[in-house]
């Protein structure tokens, strides 16, 4: 840029030119800019969450594949959950002269054993409204509890779990889960349910490292209850603690499951995304 010099004696003009020539803070050239690490990228993404819309909940895009590795208490792999984003759609509704935009993400999922054989398959739906993404309650199905009802009819009712973009540490989140009504053609047999309750945000974004990388995650602790009810007065229950680590720009990164005595039973970690 050319800076015009006002009419002045030659000495003053020279002094002004020298001052203008003094180098300021160096501006990095395109070639000298250092690429951020994966951890830095996660941090940068997190810092932009508050300005992001629900156009891509958890940063998901059509055709994207995700994998979660299941680990036992000793950290040994027992299987893999695989998800594929098949469709993303956006709807808008007007209420009291305000437009509410929501985005729905439909995914196909499958549980694979160590031999890469399919054990379970499930379609799930995520959606986002305002600043919160909701995961499908059907993702909480207790498949072990359904093993004795393989040939029966099943009706699934899920309650979504909320994951705000910017929750307040110490705040409570709504309960979620799923109820599976098991029936024969003529009579109801049992209800098999998973309830995730007393959900509380325990920690602000903290670095969490999993096979897929390092992410800054909120920590949510809750009580997880599994129940099989043959009738109102005959209910088998087991309870424990669940700890979820989620990055609003990525989704669930890690989940730990503990028994009633506080012992880790298994965990689920993000393998690929």
Image (cartoon, helix red, strand yellow):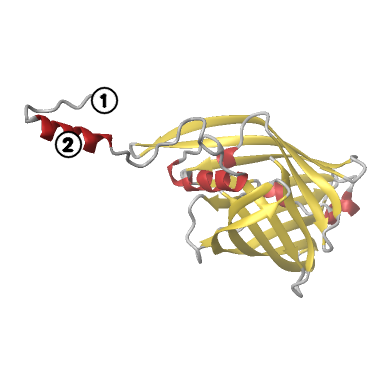
Front residue of this view, candidates 48 and 61: 48
Residue depicted at x 33% and y 36%:
97
The outermost residue toward the left is 8
Circle 1 sits on which residue?
Answer: 1
Specify whether residue 177 is in view: no
Is 128 placed left or right of 108 in the picture? left
**Residue 5: percent from the left, percent from the top?**
13, 27
Can you say which quadrant of the picture contains the N terminus?
A: top left
Is 245 placed left or right of 263 in the picture? left
Residue depicted at x 55% and y 64%:
203
Q: On screen, 249 above or below 142?
A: above
Residue depicted at x 44% and y 34%:
93
**Residue 168: percent from the left, percent from the top?**
47, 60
Q: Earlier in the sequence, mark 1 or mark 2?
A: 1
**Residue 216: percent from the left, percent from the top?**
58, 53
Residue 104, picture quadrant: top right
Circle 2 sits on which residue?
Answer: 15
Can you say which quadrant of the picture contains the C terminus?
A: top right
**Residue 54: percent from the left, percent from the top?**
50, 38
Front residue of this view, candidates 105 and 151: 105
Residue depicted at x 12% and y 34%:
11
Q: Secondary structure at mark 2?
A: helix
Q: Secondary structure at mark 1?
A: loop
The outermost residue toward the bottom is 261
Residue 38, picture quadrant: top right
């Amino acid at each position: 840029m050319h800076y015009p010099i006002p009419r002045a004696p030659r000495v003053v003009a020279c002094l002004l030119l020298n001052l203008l020539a003094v180098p300021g803070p160096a501006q990095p050239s395109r070639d000298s800019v250092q690429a951020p690490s994966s951890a830095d990228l996660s941090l940068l993404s997190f810092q932009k969450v508050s300005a992001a819309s629900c156009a891509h909940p958890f940063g998901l895009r059509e055709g994207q594949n995700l994998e979660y590795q299941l680990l036992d208490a000793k950290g040994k792999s027992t299987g893999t959950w695989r998800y594929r984003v098949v469709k993303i759609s956006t709807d808008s509704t007007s209420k009291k002269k305000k437009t509410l935009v929501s985005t729905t993400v439909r995914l196909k999922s499958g549980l694979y054993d160590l031999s890469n054989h399919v054990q379970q398959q499930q379609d799930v739906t995520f959606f986002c409204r305002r600043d919160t993404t909701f995961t499908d309650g059907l993702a909480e199905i207790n498949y072990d509890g359904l093993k004795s009802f393989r040939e029966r009819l099943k009706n699934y009712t899920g309650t979504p779990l909320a994951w705000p973009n910017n929750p307040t540490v110490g705040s409570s989140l709504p309960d979620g889960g799923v109820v599976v009504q098991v029936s024969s053609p003529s009579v109801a047999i049992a209800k098999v349910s998973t309830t995730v309750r007393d959900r509380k945000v325990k920690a602000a974004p903290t670095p969490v490292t999993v096979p897929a990388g390092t992410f800054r995650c909120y920590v949510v602790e809750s009580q997880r209850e599994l129940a099989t009810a043959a009738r109102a007065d005959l209910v088998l229950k087991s309870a424990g603690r669940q700890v979820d680590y989620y990055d609003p720009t990525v989704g669930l990164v890690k989940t730990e499951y503990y028994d009633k005595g506080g012992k880790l039973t298994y965990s689920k970690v993000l393998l690929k995304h």
